[in-house]
Image (cartoon, rainbow, N blue to C red):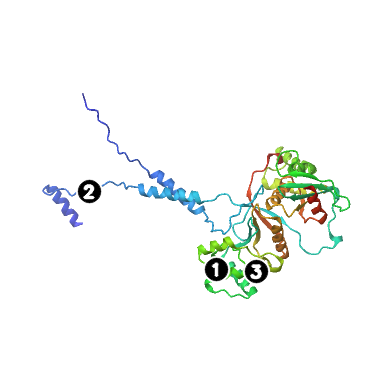
Amino acid sequence: MSEVQQQESSDKGGKHKKVRAKKSSTHVDMTPMVDLAFLLLTFFIMTTTFSKPKTMDITMPVKDEVKDEDRTKVPASQTMSVILTADNKVIWYFGQEDPEKPPVTSMATFSQTGENSIHKILLEKNALVNNQVKAVEDSVKRGLIEDKEDVIKAHKAAVKNAEKKGLIVLIKPDETSKYNNLVDILDEMLICNVARYAIVDLSESEKELVKNTK
Amino acid sequence: MPKIKIAKKSPSLDMTPMVDLAFLLVTFFMLTTKFRPDEPVIVDQPSSVSQIPLPDKGVLMLTIDGKGRVFFNVEGQQIRRDILDRLGSHFNMTFDENEKKRFSVLSSIGMPMKDLKKYLNAESEERKILNAETKGIPIDSTNNELAIWVNSARKAAPRFSLAIKGDREADIPTIKRVISILQDNKANRFALITNLEGAPEAAK
């Protein structure tokens, strides 16, 4: 303290030059830092992946020997067999396959539009359930059902499972079909509100059928 | 004529807000990014309208590529070590500490047991060649190694869910075979990994 006071007094005397702090600019050149920041930014934007993969849950039956009387019996008129074959073609028919009496089969494609799209056929055949699902959507619009995603989902699931006369689809992927086809058809099950479906192996007579159709 | 004086302005402008923003974004991306480990196979997944996201943790993943090769992957170093121990005891092989460490940090593995040691001791460049040449984990009924992999993994991590990541072009017999192996292991629920696709209008 004493030193400072001494200096002050000497300033007053005016004999010594003023001691001035050098006025240097407070600005720092930030350009390199900004360059680096943007470089990192670009890098992380490029490497980041926002879209997470989605999954599709499937449940397969327990692989034990099931006695014949324990099997769930389903009416043949409700059962639609969908055989996936090479080149994204689909063969479908209604009812039970019978080696003696080959069923009336039709061909379909995986496209979303057109006369022969499997999507259209499934929607049409499952109209009973689809209309009920639509009714749920209508009630949402009219405010009868709460407009919350999980509430709507629960209602739809309830409607789908309650309808005993809904379509039952047996998915039969042929040896020559691709995994893509299987996922596509499982996807159609979801879109077309098919509540009951299963992945089944082809029987011998169906293999013959595929051969003959080609 | 009076001289026109141009006001002397510094050409540098204040970059502070921009820098702030840039760093904010850098921080955001640094924190949200998750580096994808070097996968030995590239798989083109089919797309679906399903919206269920894949859980971040606790997934046993079976990758099936377009050639029908099967790869196995699970996250978690401790679990991987445990799986390797179980595999070792099943096939009467012993792995040293170094090999265990390598195994615990690698990603998908698609090696037959007899080549696994070679694969673990290989350098990363060699490993790429091995991955390109491998036939995947054997799944045929005479040499069903995948069943043992799945079994060991289920024992090491009983709460993990199973996921199949298949390529669009993977053939159905292989997929069916893998599903059947899972069923044999009492794993009847599993997920198929797909990409998101918009739902068609007609369904709405």
Q: Residues within 10 Å of mark 2 (few under 14, many from 20)?
A: few
Figure label count: 3
Which quadrant: the N terminus of chain A? bottom left
Q: Residue at x 71, y 63 (%)?
A: B181
Badge 3 sits on which subunit? B
The amino acid type of the residue labelled 2 equals: Lys
Choose mark 2 or mark 1, whichever is in front.
Answer: 1
Q: Are marks 2 and 1 in contact (CB under 8 Å)?
A: no
Q: Which residue is mark 3?
A: B152
Q: In this view of the protein, which residue sits in the foreground, A35 or A9?
A: A35
Q: Which mark is residue B54?
A: none
Q: Along the horizontal axis of the image, is B89 left or right of A9?
A: right
- Co-location on one chain, circles 3 and 2: no
Q: Which residue is mark 1?
A: B120
| Label 1 SS | helix
| Label 2 SS | loop
Badge 2 sits on which subunit? A
Q: In this view of the protein, which residue sits in the foreground, B10 or A178?
A: A178
Between the residue at mark 3 and the residue at mark 1, the CA separation in whole angstroms equals: 19 Å
Q: In this view of the protein, which residue sits in the foreground, A25 or A80?
A: A80
Q: Which residue is mark 2?
A: A22
Percent coordinates x, y for residue B128 in the rendering: 54, 61
Percent coordinates x, y for residue B142 in the rendering: 71, 68
